[in-house]
Image (tube, grey):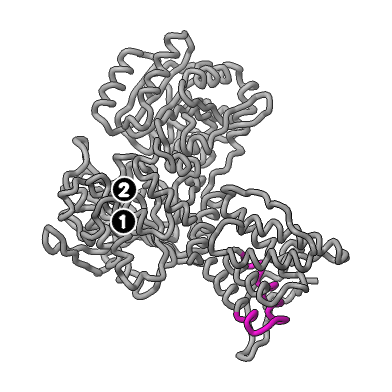
Amino acid sequence: MPSQDPRAKVPSERGTLETSVPSRVTASTTGRVAGQSPRVERALQRAAALDLLALYDHPQKDRDFRKRLLAFLLGVHQTRPRGTPSFGLIPLRERDERRAQALTAFLADSNLSSQLAIDVATRLGEVGGVEVIPLLARAAKKGSARLWSAAREAIARIEQTRSMLIVFVAMEVKPYSGVGGLGNVMKELPKALVRRGHRVIVLTPRHASIDRSKLIDTGWTGEIVNCDGREPFQILKDSRDGVDIYFIENDLYFSANRPGIYGDRHGPFGDNDKRYDFFGASVPQALTKILKGTRPDIIQLNDAHTGSAAVYLRNDASFNSTKIVTAVHNLGAAYQGRFPGHHLEHFMFDRALFYPAGPAEFYGEVNLLKLGLTHADGVLFVSRRYMEECLGPERGEGLHGVLQEVAKRRRLWGCLNGVDYETWNPASDEKIPVRYDLSDLPGKAACKAALQKAYGLAERPEVPLIGALARLDWQKGWEDVMRAVRYTEATDREAQFVLSGTGSEELEERLIELAEQHPGRVVFDPKFSPEKEHAIYAGADLFLMPSRFEPCGLPQMYALRYLTVPIVHAVGGLDESIEEYDPKEGTGNGFKFKRDLTGAIDRALDWYESGPEGRQELLELCASCDFSWETTTGPELAAFYRELLFAP
């Protein structure tokens, strides 16, 4: 039976190996159940080994391990294993849990060779949790000095990954700054990782909109020498939810006379190439001062704005053992950080990186996202579906070849972003008129009535209210929103629309005209505020999100939490997070379309017109969805970071 001593000790020539671990070890982690016959044990161990073969089937680094595992099966079990199943892109967390279970069951086999036992112990350090530490300690106690050493290193790795030092670098971080999903992610993901026991630092510019008086001046400074001369920067600080946020302050590029983050109503700032490169060059300098010699385990760079930082970190010996992640929140052509080739003199990285098909070159242009992709240890997409789309030419925007090379090295992964349910929770949301949940639907009805009243719409509970809230950009599918309005009127389907967004002046004019053409049916609000955003999620019955492409999408997840049923285009993260409602099977959480949205609009309106009882099942399915950082995305990202830490 497993030892109940929470401090396992392994004798050695230099003393004992001590680890503080939970006292309970389950049968699944030891591979043995009390009273189990040796024959059953060996059958379980063989099944575990076959499962393990499948899980280790592809990575080149595990080829020798696989050979030894096959040799053991052929020699000990006297049978040749048949073809192993294909696991595809199973979640990393699930794969690691299965690897750990198979490895621990395998390690319990007394016929295991010394070398294979060492291999198993080493790999347990890569995928196991604290629950395997007692098993490692006991195996080391019975084994050789080499096995003891492997077990000690494995335990150290497990302890390291329980509390990693993770740095995020991003141009926007809410609530300080933000124009889209990136700002939300940089607010919510670091907090979720802190709750999992990691230390997290965020590095971002101090934009003009951020009140300097509310930040702490650290007194740390730096200087960047670029084509504009010597440009100093200061480092300011704030802390929220256990996360330390540091701000790079420079008046020329960020902190003075800049009404936006990337641009203003007239378009992108003309010196964004210099701004992004300055920020990238400041990263290693700032982190050296902030961390004072401590080495980060992971530095995650986010989107093209931080692409050059990957080069500068690579060239700094202080970060040699740090793994660099480039996270792609949007691969669209407008978001790759492309600049004319003759702007090369504006950048501080080595000109040798700019040559035909080179790391910085893209059809004669400088491409900062490509630079980040080619200099990262791992590339992370904000949904698996979007990652798969971008591996092809249609959605890869010219970078699909680069991504395919990353995928061959098994350094490419996709993971849906999550939601902070403390912020997005109608039961506690102070930004909405009435708090509610699934057990209090009259509260949601009150929010709908308040939204209708606020925008001058008839307060009619029997008429479905459709909300659409997004950046005014053609990517967000606003032409389909306009088509939905015209379609419902042309087919005499009763519906009201509340639309809101900021961005393109052309789109704003089109939407104002649409509202004027359909009084009483459509309202458009060009002024964004968090209060209006929450009010639309709470008050609408349906949420329309017909993006042309969507890397992840957060609004559809927010809508689900507010019992507002999404209608989405089946692309990227929308396709991954929303399943078509099937009333016969009682499955799904929304409505989807691939080409023509009118069918999805009809199905959604039919659902609403079925009445309160007919609507109940889908609302229950929406309420059961869990896209929280804590239970889904956070653990999966931690597994991805862990994978990179131990990669060769």
Question: Callout 2: 10 Å neighbours few (<14), some, many (20+)?
Answer: many
Q: Nearer the viewer, mark 2 or mark 1?
A: 1
Residue toward you, 99 or 590: 99
Q: Answer with the quarter of the image where residue 443 lies.
A: top right
Q: Is residue 581 above or below residue 51?
A: above
Residues under numbered marks 2 and 1 in contact, where contact means CB atoms less than 8 Å apart = yes
Q: Magenta residues: mostly which secondary structure?
A: helix
Q: Is residue 477 magenta?
A: no
Residue toward you, 66 or 2: 66
Residue 31: image x %, image y %? 76, 65
Q: Is residue 131 magenta?
A: yes
Q: Answer with the quarter of the image where residue 430 lies.
A: top left
Q: Is residue 594 above or below residue 252?
A: above
Residue toward you, 474 or 443: 474
Specify the amino acid type for callout 2: Ser
Quadrant of image for the N terminus: bottom right
Q: Is residue 430 visible?
A: no
Residue 152: image x %, image y %? 60, 78
Q: In screen coordinates, is 75 left or right of 202?
A: right
Residue 177: mark: 2
Q: Is residue 260 above or below residue 523?
A: below
Q: The magenta stretch spans which residues?
A: 128-149
Residue 386: image x %, image y %? 46, 41
Q: Give the mark nearer the N terminus: 2 vs 1.
A: 2
Badge 1 is on which residue?
A: 204
- Residue furthest to the left: 229
Distance, label 2 to label 1, CA atoms, is 9 Å
Q: Who's the residue at 62% across and 53% down the image?
A: 94
Q: Who's the residue at 35% across and 40% down the image?
A: 397
Q: Answer with the quarter of the image where residue 122 lies.
A: bottom right
